[in-house]
Amino acid sequence: MAMDRKCQGVIVPVITPFTENGKIDSESVCRITDHLIAGGADGIFALGTTGEGASIPISEKKKMVQAVVDNAKNRILVYAGISSNCLDESIAIAEHFLDLGTDVLVAHVPSYFPLQEEEIFSYFVKLADRTAGPLMLYNIPATTRLSLSIDVTDKLSRHERIIGLKDSENTPGRLEAAIERFSGRSDFSYVVGCASLSAQGVALGAAGIVPSCANLYPRLYKALFECAQKGSMPDAEKLQEQTDHISLLYQRNRSLGQSIAALKAAMHSLGFCKPVVLPPLETLQKEDIARMQKQMATMTFS
């Protein structure tokens, strides 16, 4: 399936802002969307891992995507997560998101049953066959406990609706092998899901990056992407160091889930949203939120 715009550049895995009672905070969605577009983002990915997609009821997922699409107003590509352990549920929500105006659907493997490679391949073929829009594969073994191999991805990439891979696996040699396999493709986009590999990945030929820290400072990642793409590696590496430093602010000594809560607190300190996360994650305590505000006040990046 041809797209008017290729999946590339800085794709921000946007946080999902909630009210105190756990509903979508549409006003905050608008603030954050405008912030990301003004910061040079090329895409917004809603309902991913950073967006707590696995914890949100379908009714609120629909509200989140509606708010992002409405505020994006075709200024930026909108990606929406449809991952579920139920194939029919993924297909139904995909149809709804496409009707709302979503540009690209994103899905990782179902994460309950251990799956063999042929089962992973078959699952994504079924999903792509039964959805009408472009589908980006999402590899994130940290949560699914399954790796989407490069060989299986290559086979899936021949499907007309499968247009890319967001790769959040950081095993030795994988980045280089994946980019060598996919970088020459005009019909398939390999995007780096490990923020610390952003500069290296783009320099090697990755089409895009998906860094959670770009919620805070999208301009830094836009500059990093552009420097790495044109080969200005000293500048790109300096920006990589800066963004890694910011990421540690909410990731150091925290699990993945705890880091999402801390990122929410950091966004709260900048006035974008409340620090609320949904169960099973836990919102930071007041003293931790206050500490995050003090730390954010020392940041001079923009």
Image: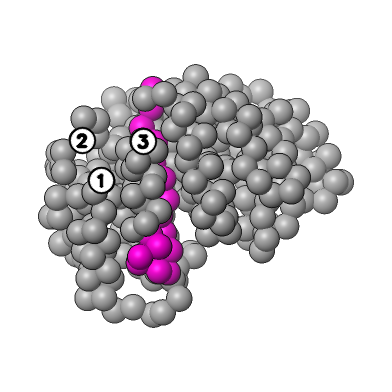
Determine the residue positioned at 68% across, 35% down: 273
Q: Quadrant of residue 91?
A: bottom left
Amino acid type at circle 3 is: Gly
Is residue 78 rendered magenta in the image? Answer: yes
Amino acid type at circle 2 is: Met
Amino acid type at circle 1 is: Pro
Find the magenta span and give its range.
75-90
| Nearer the camera: disc 1 or disc 3 | 3
Q: Are marks 1 and 3 in contact (CB under 8 Å)?
A: no
- In the rendered structure, the answer to whether residue 82 lies left or right of residue 263 reads left
Query: At numbered mark 2, what does the secondary structure look like: helix, strand or loop?
Result: loop
Please say if 31 is above or below 276.
above
The disc placed on residue 3 is: 2
Examine the rendering and report whether any part of residue 112 can be seen: yes
Q: Are marks 1 and 2 in contact (CB under 8 Å)?
A: yes
Near mark 2 (Cα within 10 A), the count class, few <14, some 14-19 or many ≥20, is few
Q: Quadrant of residue 227?
A: top left
Near mark 3 (Cα within 10 A), the count class, few <14, some 14-19 or many ≥20, is some
Residue that numbered label 1 is attached to: 134
Residue that numbered label 3 is attached to: 101
Distance (Cα) linking label 2 and label 3: 14 Å
Please say if 147 is above or below 189.
below
Determine the residue positioned at 31% across, 55% down: 137
Give percent across and percent down for residue 197.
41, 45
| Nearer the camera: disc 2 or disc 3 | 3
Distance (Cα) linking label 1 and label 3: 12 Å
Determine the residue positioned at 26% across, 76% down: 119
Query: At numbered mark 3, what does the secondary structure look like: helix, strand or loop?
Result: loop
Distance (Cα) linking label 1 and label 2: 8 Å
